[in-house]
Amino acid sequence: MSGARSTAEVAEELGVSREKVRNWIKAGKLPAINIGTRTKPSFRILAEDLETFVAGLQVQAAPRTRRKKSKPAAIPFYEQ
């Protein structure tokens, strides 16, 4: 299988953890081929599938904006 990469290789290329890559595979977001067993999977990702996935990430990526936390309204203090 030329052009097939392991989860470790993909993780290093994308700058994420291997667990993140495995989660994308389990969620069906990143197509992969299991060359291991059901109880001990070993995934390979084809170069074409990785390119399509990365292109989709770039389209979906939007800058995150932080919302300012609103401060609780001041409770008026009344003297008695």
Image (cartoon, rainbow, N blue to C red):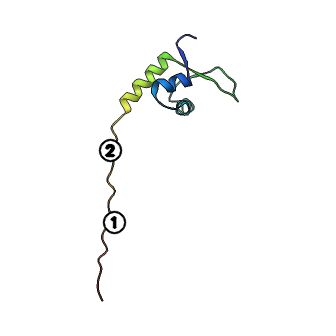
Q: Earlier in the sequence, mark 1 or mark 2?
A: 2
Q: On residue 28, which mark appears?
A: none
Residue positioned 29% across, 86% down in the render: 79
Residue type of the residue flagged with mark 2: Thr
Q: Relative to 40, is 12 on the left or the right? A: left
Above or below, 9 relative to 77: above
Residue positioned 70% across, 24% down in the render: 37
Q: Quadrant of residue 18?
A: top right
Disc 1 on helix, strand or loop? loop
Q: On residue 65, which mark appears?
A: 2
Residue positioned 40% across, 24% down in the render: 55
Above or below, 72 relative to 33: below
Disc 2 on helix, strand or loop? loop
Separation of residues labelled 1 and 2 (CA atoms): 21 Å
Pointer 2 local density, CA inside 10 Å: few below 14, some 14–19, many at least 20: few
Give the quadrant of the C terminus: bottom left
Residue type of the residue flagged with mark 1: Pro
Q: Relative to 4, is 14 on the left or the right? A: left
Pointer 1 local density, CA inside 10 Å: few below 14, some 14–19, many at least 20: few
Q: Residue furthest bottom?
A: 80
Q: Residue furthest top?
A: 2
Name the residue nearer the viewer: 32 or 76.
76
Residue 58 picture location, percent across and down: 37, 28
Give yes or no for contact between labels 1 and 2 (Cβ–Cβ under 8 Å): no
Q: Relative to 15, is 72 on the left or the right? A: left
Residue positioned 32% across, 44% down in the render: 65
Residue 1 picture location, percent across and down: 58, 11
Q: Name the residue that disc number 1 marks.
A: 72
Q: Number of labelled discs? A: 2
Residue 30 picture location, percent across and down: 51, 26
